[in-house]
Amino acid sequence: MRVLILRGNPRKGGVSDKMADLFAEGLRRTPAHVDDVDLCSSNINPCRGCFICSSSDSARGACPINDDMRAIIPLVEEADALVCVSPVYFYGMSAQMKAFFDRCFPFVKGYDFDKEKGNLINITSFPLKPKKLVTISIASGRLRGSFDAMSATYASIAGALGIEYVADIRRGESPYFSILGGMSLRVRRVLDAMVKAGEQFGLEGFIQPRTLRTAELELAESDAAFAANAKVFWALRKRGDSRGGFSSGAASEDMGILLSEMCKRFSPQNSPKNASIRFDFGDSRVYSIKIAEGSCELCRSSDFKEQLAVYCAPEVWVGLSSGRKNAIEEMKKGFLKVEGDLSLMAKLNRIFPRGNA
Ligand SMILES: Cc1cc2nc3c(=O)[nH]c(=O)nc-3n(C[C@H](O)[C@H](O)[C@H](O)COP(=O)(O)O)c2cc1C
């Protein structure tokens, strides 16, 4: 199977790129042949609506505009599947993705009347190899409606070109991927599902519903939590932190997010019945985790005396919680100070296991 990935994301290294990379990684585990085209760095002019292509005998060279579409049209013809990746821009696909589809007009030739169904249908000018379409759409919001207009447009375009629309992956909450990077378990499940989706598509020509559901998993537990965390993202942007990609460093700006993610991984069976840990990140950022009778709670401040106190800079805790730093090494270097019940410190990785959902 020849798969043509079409990237319509103007911002490089963002969430669309990441999702496209993961899907491509899955595809490359299969015998599928993958072509990857960045529409935004290609020179693709808007369609001028001259209809000259409609009078041509071939889709190749049918358009009088001499730009990169001359090289892309043959790739579209040869492909067995198109994978279109685009951010949601005001409820639609990016202008670059739309310009690409408008320039596919050489493939379209008016209408026909389907006597059996009794309705009008689009017809294509040139015999197109049977094709499948997968779309991956990225939005910052978590409103399901954010994607509806875009999906409807893709579905109509697929209908007009006689392409089978097999999967519409709608990935909302994109700021979460910047804030939490690979540290949240739910984010990691989504990232893994994107690779799996590529692999399943490359092997079977479709994506299993369960994989799609995981790829679209909601990351915030409520709209209110999403709004609160999205504010952290926008505050970072305002402060000039333009790391929109997968930098986990951004998370160090809000340790509350990191620690609440850690609490979600709480494993009661590996934990003492009652425990309390204080985290002091300097700059008056103090948090406490209280474990009582099999449940775990994050408090911004506490009126109880903690068994264990951890003192370090935010980036040190980010490194420790992602497994990139080692606690003993950090203590030796003087970057991590621990007071109280040291055996509790030694158990933290089991109480909050990184590998559990
Ligand atoms: C011009 C513009 C319009 C946008 N419109 C929407 C929108 O309608 N709904 C939404 O949820 N996000 C919207 N967003 C947010 C983007 O979809 C989001 O930031 C996404 O992560 C961008 O993809 P990237 O990370 O690959 O750059 C918009 C962003 C821009 C720049």
Image (cartoon, rainbow, N blue to C red):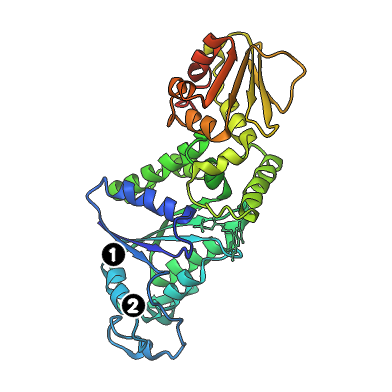
In 3D space, how far apart are the residues under numbered discs 2 and 1 (Cα atoms)? 17 Å
Label of residue 8 in the image:
none
Q: Secondary structure at mark 2?
A: loop
Q: Please name the residue shown 30% across and 47% down the image.
A: 204
Query: Disc 2, ligand 1: is the CB inside 8 Å?
Result: no
- CB within 8 Å, label 2 to label 1: no
Query: Disc 1, ligand 1: is the CB inside 8 Å?
Result: no
Please state which of residues 355 and 3 is positioned toward the viewer in this rendering: 355
Q: Could one spot residue 116 in this view of the protein?
A: no
| Residue at the farthest left position | 31
Q: Please name the residue shown 50% across and 41% down the image.
A: 248
Q: Which residue is mark 1?
A: 79
Q: Secondary structure at mark 1?
A: loop
Q: Position of residue 54 (x, y in %)?
A: 37, 87
Left or right of residue 73: residue 47: right
Residue 85 found in image quarter: bottom left
Q: Which residue is mark 2?
A: 68
Left or right of residue 208: residue 15: right
Residue 254 found in image quarter: top right
